[in-house]
Image: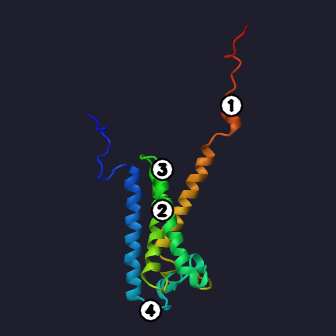
Amino acid sequence: MTDTAPPIAGRASTAPRDRTFWGFIVLIAVTDIVTKRWAERALALHTPEDVFPPWLRWTLTYNTGAAMNLSLGDWSRVVFSLIAVSMIGYLFVLYRQAAPESRATPAALGLIAAGAFGNLLDRLRHTKGVVDFIDVGTADWRFWTFNVADVGVTSGAILLALLLFNENDATPTPESAVSVPSPESASHD
């Protein structure tokens, strides 16, 4: 016998969409918070610590701007915090619109929302900026220093773009949607 009763009010849903979205929110947000606090306690500001030289090192920095140090001057903290709150709200709406059986779209939305949340917490916590510490590159070239929240936002955005791209590929074109009867099925007068 299958249980087809609607969910009880106030009871958490166990739909794949919900488990996936909230699972990624918790995983990325907690990992981001824990690793940032570790970096602030264990690393000296702007002093690289080799992990896998020269490819990976830990370097504590604070980013008062946004991605790749985009800055709006004194308004950066307020504007980027408002953008983050708005985006998290919008991502939550998109998550609620996803089919209860879906997993990929809620995963992408959860990754992005968790990353936005992690960086928002840093902006609200203090004026120093967002904690960044993951430093990758080569001996001659370094990428921007980033954090776990940035990994969530980036990987979620890539996944969402791939899903949208595949969705567009699966959408029939107007020409292919028109059904043309075969000569055998045509009736003769």
Q: What amino acid does circle 4 point to?
A: Ala
Q: Which residue is mark 4?
A: 44
Q: What amino acid does circle 3 point to?
A: Gln
Which quadrant, please, contains the C terminus?
A: top right
Residue farthest to the left?
1
* Residue 166 x, y percent position in the rendering: 59, 49
Q: Earlier in the sequence, mark 4 or mark 3?
A: 4
Q: Which residue is mark 2?
A: 89
Q: Write the residue at 54% across / 57% down.
A: 160
Q: Which residue is mark 1?
A: 178
Badge nearest the viewer, 1 or 2:
2
Label disc, if present, on residue 61 of the rendered structure: none
- Left or right: 167 with respect to 118? right
Label 2 sits on a secondary structure element that is helix
* In-front residue for pair 18/5: 5
For marks 4 and 1, give the CA distance. Answer: 65 Å
Q: What amino acid does circle 1 point to?
A: Val
Q: Earlier in the sequence, mark 3 or mark 2?
A: 2
Badge nearest the viewer, 3 or 1:
3
For marks 4 and 3, give the CA distance. Answer: 44 Å
- Left or right: 1 with respect to 105? left
- Left or right: 145 with respect to 39? right
* Residue 70 x, y percent position in the rendering: 61, 79
Badge nearest the viewer, 4 or 3:
3
Dot 1 alpha-carbon crowd within 10 angstroms: few under 14, some 14 to 19, many 20 or more? few
* Residue 101 x, y percent position in the rendering: 42, 46
For marks 3 and 1, give the CA distance. Answer: 29 Å
